[in-house]
Amino acid sequence: MDEVFPELTEDVIARMKNGEPRLREVVTLLVRHLHAFAREASLTQDEWRAGIDFLTRTGQKCSESRQEFILLSDILGVSMLVDAIATKRVMASRNQLSWGRSTRVRSASSTKATRSFCVRRTARLWS
C-alpha cells in the first residue's frame, strides 16, 4: 500500500532543524512512528478527534498533586519499559567496569524472570 502524503512527515521533521540534537532525534522518531501509526490504522478524523479529546481530558484532570499522564504512561507500559532500558544501560556499564569488556545483557522483555529482576534492580538503584 502506498503511503498517504509521505512528504508531510519529512516536511514536519525538516522544520525541527534547530535545538538540542538528542531532543530532535527523539521527536523525529516520535513524528515518524505517530505518522506511521495514523497511516497503518487509517485513522478517521472522528477517531483522531476522539484521541485528542481523551488527551485533553487527561490534561484537564492534572494538577500540582495529580499527574494523570504518569498514570497513563504506567497503563501503557511505557514507564516500565523506560525503567528496563535504564536498568539495562546501568547493568551493561557495570559489567564493562567490572570485567573490563562489554558483555551482552539480556533484554528486559525476554522472560518474565528477567522483567521481574529489572523491576527489583531498578527499585534498588533509585531508592
Image (spheres, grey):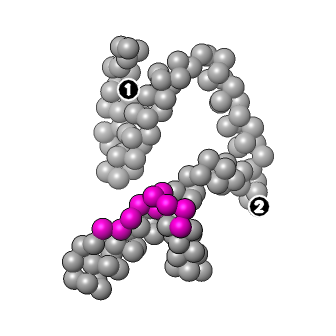
Q: CA distance from mark 1 to mark 2?
A: 36 Å
Considering the numbered disc 2 on the image, is that residue within a helix, a strand or a loop?
Answer: loop
Task: Please determine whether, in this image, residue 101 is positioned above or below residue 24.
Answer: below
Q: Which mark is residue 65?
A: 2
Magenta region, residue range: 104-113
**Left or right position of 6 against 109:** left
Q: Amino acid at mark 2?
A: Ser
- Earlier along the polypeptide chain: callout 1 or callout 2? 1
Q: Residues within 10 Å of mark 2 (few under 14, many from 20)?
A: few
Question: Is any atom of residue 122 visible in this view?
Answer: no
Considering depth in this image, is 19 or 31 the residue closer to the camera? 31
Considering the numbered disc 1 on the image, is that residue within a helix, a strand or a loop?
Answer: helix
**Left or right position of 28 against 55:** left
Queried whether the magenta region covers residue 91, the answer comes back as no
Q: Which residue is mark 1?
A: 9
Queried whether the magenta region covers residue 109, the answer comes back as yes
Considering depth in this image, is 97 or 48 the residue closer to the camera? 97
Q: Position of residue 18 (x, y in %)?
A: 32, 43
Q: Where is the N terminus found, in terms of image quarters?
A: top left
Identity of the residue furthest to the bottom in this view: 98
Q: Where is the C terminus found, in terms of image quarters?
A: bottom right
The residue shown at (52%, 57%) is 81
